[in-house]
Amino acid sequence: MITMSNHAGAVSELVEQLGRLPGIGRKSAERLAFHLLRVSEHEALGLADAIRRVRKDVRYCSACFNLSETELCSICSDPNRDKTRICVVEQPRDLMSLEQSSAYRGVYHVLLGRIAPLDGIGPDQLTIDPLVERVRKGNFVEVIMATNPTVEGDGTSLYISNLLSEYPVVVTRLARGITAGSVLEYANREMIADALTGRQKL
């Protein structure tokens, strides 16, 4: 029988660690901790094993910087993808949102962030140089800027479009089916599909 008196230190540490997760406050962390104490040992340790496996096995795709367990992610290694179009997103979760729309069959490039001078994030901290190199060496005809429609996202798109201006590619951006100030992660499937279909030249 697990009791707070016998395991207060361990429970407190678990609550503290869970509370560090984004969007999880103290009360939510406590609820999650006590849930893990109530479920079977197999279920609780299954979560621990999943976290351990993610940290050990998941890496960035060597081509696009998407999350992958192999050198190339499943999208980059798919021979049926359109290798003449590349969609630039800020984070892997944005890529996942676009994929759920089923409206795009090209490849991607994940920046792993956006230019945000106030947060101390500059172009050299993102994967912009590898993107420019991919465009220089590849046979791309279109680069779709799918950064989030925020001040930082738009600034990042403009910066990249200027870098790509010397290459024979058309730079487009998502149509404003996605409202300014929102993020791709929370857009629904139809909204993303409309934005992809109605993308515009940048």
Image (tube, grey):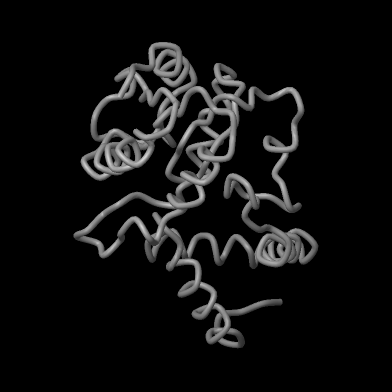
| Image quadrant in which the C terminus is located | top left
Report the front residue among 94 and 31.
94
Q: Give above or below for 51 relative to 4.
A: above
Task: Report the number of numbered marks.
Answer: 0
Measuring from the top left, give residue 119's x and y in whole percent.
25, 62
Q: Residue drawn at (55%, 66%), measured in percent from left and top? A: 33
| Horizontal arrangement in the rendering, residue 126 relative to residue 107 (left or right) | left
Q: Give above or below for 25 relative to 89.
A: below
Q: Give above or below for 150 relative to 173.
A: below
Measuring from the top left, give residue 18's x and y in whole percent.
49, 67
Report the front residue among 156 and 32.
156
| Horizontal arrangement in the rendering, residue 185 relative to residue 77 (left or right) | left
- Picture quadrant of residue 198: top left
Q: Residue drawn at (47%, 16%), measured in percent from left and top? A: 193
Measuring from the top left, give residue 126's x and y in whole percent.
42, 55
Q: Residue drawn at (59%, 35%), measured in percent from left and top? A: 138
Q: Give above or below for 20 relative to 96.
A: below
Report the front residue among 125 and 193.
125
| Image quadrant in which the N terminus is located | bottom right
Measuring from the top left, give residue 24's x and y in whole percent.
41, 58
| Horizontal arrangement in the rendering, residue 6 relative to residue 171 (left or right) | right
